[in-house]
Image: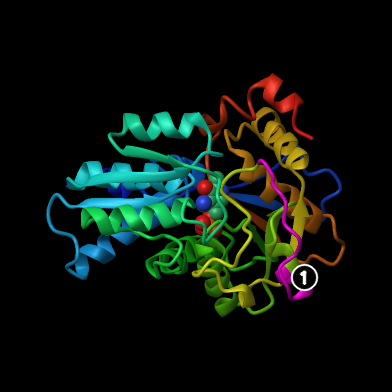
């Protein structure tokens, strides 16, 4: 019998048509917001749980603990619901209230931490680790779990390659854990080493410096959620990335609005970041094939932020 879990993946790849002035090649978006949980993270939620089941580390009815920007939590919550596990989500204060209420509605316990840097005992990943130890629960650990990049190598990458009939000029994505860009990048480069893998990084993240200059850049705070980092996440393989494009919050959110209004794509802020970077590449006369941007999640998570005019006006 098919379940909702069979509806994860095999998302559409569609061409942008109205925001593409000046582009020499098509700009295509991989619509990960059309997964059942509304984000790319459904893929790794299912992969992490299946991998843990296969390794025999998940007893029936076990509790999962995840440090999440929100989307992995939603993916894990629906997988947990169907498979009969409990879920605790540890989320930094920065993340939208829409995400908190979605997770609570899905039956997860939600614990909010300070926006503390990596290594600080109050950091969301440190808190998740402590709670998993205290409760004897399974730490899903998307930042370290090899099942994360693997699922993108085995599903997202091959889907994009097939949907483009083998003709990809560049692939663009942001990095949260780095699972998406590492898995898709490795797959596409394995098929065609000339494919460019481009990091779309929020201004304020330190990763663009690492990719373009060889050392982490200066960091500062920014508003776009789920991408960028002040350290190199464990599952990220920076060697797969050719170059980084830096995108400001305002550029990201204005593009998100354009994608909704002009393209009918009901997407979130990090989609704007990826598409701004993709359009820059597609306007470069040297780009030979289509540019593929990954759309990580949908707009419903940001109603009280990007889609609230008062909030949007205050974005620097
Ligand atoms: N966009 C959003 C909104 C996310 O929540 C995430 C994951 N935290 C990403 C992009 C980045 O994906 P990945 O973790 O595979 O690098």
Q: In this figure, which colouring scheme has been used for the structure?
A: rainbow
Does any atom of ligand 1 lie closer than 8 Å to the CB of label 1? no
Magenta segment: 210-223
Question: Quick one: SS at disc 1?
Answer: helix
* Residue nearer the viewer, 33 or 104: 104
The location of residue 78, given as percent across then percent down, is 30, 42
Q: Name above or below for residue 199 compared with residue 2.
A: below
Asked whether residue 306 is drawn in magenta, I would say no
Residue at x 12%, y 54% (from the top left corner): 60
Count every numbered label the image shows and give the total: 1
Hey, which residue is sitting farthest left in the picture? 60
Q: Is residue 246 left or right of residue 111?
A: right
Residue 9, visible in the rendered structure: no
* Residue nearer the viewer, 139 or 285: 139
Task: Please tell me how crowded label 1 is: few (under 14), some (14-19), or many (20+) other residues with Cα within 10 Å.
Answer: some
Q: Is residue 282 left or right of residue 290?
A: right
Hey, which residue is sitting farthest front in the picture? 121
Residue 32, visible in the rendered structure: yes
Q: Name above or below for residue 193 compared with residue 56.
A: below
Residue on which disc 1 sits: 212
The location of residue 145, given as percent across then percent down, is 39, 67
Q: Is residue 101 left or right of residue 92?
A: left
Residue at x 74%, y 76% (from the top left corner): 214
Point out the image quarter for the C terminus: top right
Q: Name above or below for residue 139 compared with residue 103.
A: below
Mainly helix, strand or loop, the magenta region? loop
The location of residue 43, given as percent across then percent down, is 39, 54
The location of residue 286, given as percent across then percent down, is 85, 67
Residue at x 33%, y 29% (from the top left corner): 105
Asked whether residue 222 is drawn in magenta, I would say yes
């Amino acid at each position: 019998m098919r379940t909702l879990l069979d509806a994860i993946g095999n998302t559409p790849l569609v061409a942008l048509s109205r925001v593409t002035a000046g582009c020499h090649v098509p700009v295509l978006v991989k619509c990960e917001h059309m997964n059942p949980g509304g984000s790319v993270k459904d893929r790794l939620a299912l992969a992490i749980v299946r991998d843990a089941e296969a390794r025999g580390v998940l007893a029936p009815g076990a509790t999962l603990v995840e440090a999440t920007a929100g989307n992995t939590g939603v993916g894990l919550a629906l997988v947990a619901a169907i498979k009969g596990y409990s879920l605790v989500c540890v989320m930094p204060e920065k993340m939208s209230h829409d995400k908190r209420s979605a997770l609570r509605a899905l039956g997860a316990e939600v614990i909010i931490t300070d926006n503390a840097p990596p290594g600080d005992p109050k950091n969301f990943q440190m808190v998740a680790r402590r709670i998993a130890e205290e409760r004897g629960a399974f730490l899903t650990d998307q930042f370290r779990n090899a099942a994360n990049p693997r699922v993108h190598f085995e599903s997202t990458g091959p889907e994009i390659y097939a949907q483009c009939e083998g003709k990809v000029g560049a692939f663009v994505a942001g990095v949260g854990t780095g699972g998406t860009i590492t898995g898709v990048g490795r797959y596409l480069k394995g098929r065609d080493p000339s494919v460019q893998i481009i990091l779309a990084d929020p201004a304020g993240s330190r990763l663009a410096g690492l990719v373009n200059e060889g050392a982490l850049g200066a960091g500062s705070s920014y508003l776009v959620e789920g991408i960028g980092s002040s350290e190199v996440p464990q599952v990220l393989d920076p060697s797969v990335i050719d170059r980084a494009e830096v995108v400001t919050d305002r550029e990201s959110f204005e593009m998100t609005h354009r994608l909704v209004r002009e393209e009918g794509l009901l997407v979130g802020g990090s989609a704007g970041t990826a598409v701004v970077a993709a359009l820059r590449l597609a306007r470069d006369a040297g780009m030979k094939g289509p540019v593929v941007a990954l759309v990580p999640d949908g707009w419903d998570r940001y109603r009280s932020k990007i889609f609230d005019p008062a909030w949007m006006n205050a974005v620097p």
